[in-house]
Image: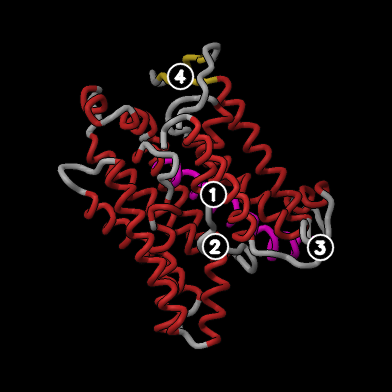
Amino acid sequence: MKPPQDTTRTVHAVRTAGGLSFRVDARAFTVIALLVAAAAFAAVVLIGSGDYSMSPGQVVTTLFGNGTFQQEFIVTELRLPRVLVGLLVGAALGVGGAVFQSVSRNPLGSPDVLGFGQGSAVGALTVIVLFGGGPAEVAAGAVGGGLLTGAAVYLLAWKRGVHGYRLVLVGIGAAAMLTAAIHYLITKADLVDATRAVVWMTGSLDGRDWSQVWPLLAVCCVLIPLVLGQGRALRMIEMGDDAAHALGVRVERTRLVLLSCAVLLVAVATAAAGPIVFVSLSAPQVARRLTRAPGPNLAAAAATGAALLLVADWTAMNAFGDRQLPVGVVTGVLGGCYLLWLLVSERRAGRI
């Protein structure tokens, strides 16, 4: 789906002292800055929420090392890791979804639909049900399952190259088979393992600590800049393989690198927080509508995903009284409504 085009866009050319030059879209830059500010504000509010509530001023003071001992313990040891995991998971899912939608040239071509989240879930459930593994083993199983699913879908979709239509069809088939495998593993599990599996599959930020932050941060710091650096090539691929070839893009190599990065980002995000659905589907499309810019809008998608996930987590914690819900429940409800709206919009536009 193409966003509405703005014929009055302001684009500035920027040249660095080293001779590099690039263009900056004023609207897109402003939207990204506002999204980052919204994510930061949501993070401060979320850190201050809970049984021991803190004002935003107290949270900021504590983050700069001027809080009381009790405040510093609550912020740095209990709440800050959860918020950082939420920010990183949201950004990773947003970027991963933007890559898949751009490569497939389909607004429904997200990891949720193409089976990569289900592949990570199968890997994690295999470790839980068959081997009784701990949190580290479950995370490794989720990453392994996501990577194996990505490799299988890519190879099955290959026929003198990977094209969006085949990728979507193969991904939907893989998602159906993996969903069946998930149900089978749950039926084989005993009551304790089945309960643990269902809790993990819901997707939650509860109980996250620094052991989840550091691996996720390392992967995001490497892969997200790598994907952002391929943004121009990805925009060319959106125009079609022939046009991208004519513009000097090595299409299959670029597509393989981008899909590998996107699969790993989604797998690591799933390993850290469980399969949080619909963020990777909705964040890139929301980013496009906000920026009104063509192309994948990778940075805007990352900021949108981070802000969206933190707002959903705050909603899950505070909008239902004393009953706190996993964030995956809230994103599922919001994402389901968004998916219905997207399908109706596509139908009205005559694209489906």
Residue plotted at (48% across, 17% down) = 14
Q: Earlier in the sequence, mark 4 or mark 3?
A: 4
Magenta span contains residue 89: yes
Which residue is farthest bottom? 190
Residue 141 visible in image: no
Q: Which mark is residue 279?
A: 1
Q: Is residue 129 left or right of residue 51?
A: left
Q: Is residue 261 left or right of residue 57?
A: left
Image quarter (top left, top right, bottom left or bottom right) of the C terminus: top left
Q: Amino acid at mark 4?
A: Arg
Q: Amino acid at mark 1?
A: Val
Magenta-colored span: 70-99
Report helix, strand or loop for mark 3.
loop
Q: Amino acid at mark 3?
A: Gly
Q: Write down the residue under mark 2.
A: 273
Q: Which mark is residue 23?
A: 4
How many angstroms separate mark 1 from mark 2 (CA)?
13 Å
Q: Earlier in the sequence, mark 1 or mark 2?
A: 2
Viewer-nearest of discs 1 and 2: 1
Report helix, strand or loop for mark 4.
strand
Viewer-nearest of discs 4 and 2: 2
Q: Write down the residue under mark 3.
A: 321
How many angstroms separate mark 3 from mark 1 (CA)?
24 Å
In percent of width and height, residue 48 lies at 78, 55
How many angstroms separate mark 1 from mark 4 (CA)?
28 Å
Q: Amino acid at mark 2?
A: Ala
Viewer-nearest of discs 4 and 3: 3
**Within-10-Å neighbours for mark 2: few <14, some 14–19, many 20+:** many
Which residue is farthest left? 160
- In which image quadrant can residue 81 be found? bottom right
